[in-house]
Amino acid sequence: MSGFYSEDNVYDLIESGIGFVMGAKKNLTYIKAALEAVRPEMNHVEHYSSVYKMTGQRIQTDYFRPRNGKGHYPVQVYVYYNRDQAIDQEYNWNKVLQERYEELQSGELKPKFEKVYATYFIQEEHDGKPLYRYNEAAIAKQKQTFGYFVLISSYKKDVWEMLSLYRNKELIEDGFHNLKDRLNMRRLRVSSESGLNGKLFTQFIALILQSYIKREMENSGLNKDYTQESFLSTLNRIDILLHKEFGATIGESTVAQKLLYSKTGVTYPE
């Protein structure tokens, strides 16, 4: 996570021989340099991933140097660009700027936006009255970073292998979320030690199934069109009618459900 980032943390990890991958802020000097270096070719098709629906490039930075100042540590910068995200960010940013402009025009300024007023607007005077216009150069510079996110790492890997490695941490975070919320593990309210062991065992099996689904989605290419949440949501509505005399009757599977079963090598219920 970018919240973990600091130069001291990076140096400590490097000098301790600990491999790492972490998010980095786009306003850092060496990150800006990396963005400028890769931007001209960022939209080339050779850098595009149909799985992740974005482009990505890797570049090495010599920013991190040993304490004696000789040479540099080979830290890799992985730059990713999502065009859809860039469009959304630009839309939201334009909306924010319009709101700030209206505040300037009405004279109802808000102290918390002082930096925004000073950076993205230019004040002029006409007949002794203040007039404001957008600072197009500053706005354009800000928009250049939209849609980008950056990872730094001590590992030199393929850009998509690195992204998968980084996102795997999200699986762990999602696992804890599922344990707490979806699987009712927020509080271990049990009346016996055997009950506790049974509950923990159930959660363990559930996480194994989650990991299995993730692997099968990657192997079958389903991760191009489905997230784990949408995958499970599609399979969520399978009706089963239980009758004490005739047993269980499983409702008809939909076309989408049959496709998911087939792609993951599971025989759909009939």
Image (cartoon, grey):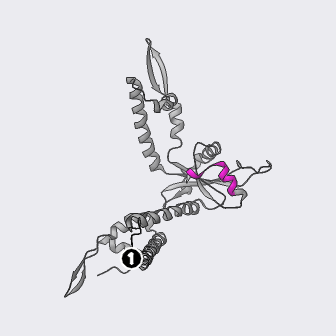
- Residue at image position (56%, 50%) is 3
**What residue range appears in magenta?**
2-13
Most extreme residue toward the bottom is: 245
Specify the quadrant of the image occupied by residue 133.
top left
Please state if 256 lies on the left or on the right of 206 as rendered. Answer: left
The answer to whether residue 262 is seen in the rendering is yes
Q: Quadrant of the image for the C terminus?
A: bottom left
Q: How many marks?
A: 1
Location of residue 109 with respect to 189 vertically, above or below: above
Residue 104 location (% of width, % of height): 42, 25
Location of residue 88 with respect to 192 vertically, above or below: above
Please state if 26 lies on the left or on the right of 183 as rendered. Answer: right
Location of residue 115 with respect to 234 vertically, above or below: above
Residue 28 falls within the magenta-colored stretch: no
Residue 215 location (% of width, % of height): 48, 72
Q: Identify residue for label 1.
A: 262
Q: Quadrant of the image for the N terminus?
A: bottom right
The answer to whether residue 150 is seen in the rendering is no
User: Which residue type does callout 1 highlight?
Assistant: Ser
Front-lying residue, 144 or 152: 152
Residue 241 location (% of width, % of height): 22, 79
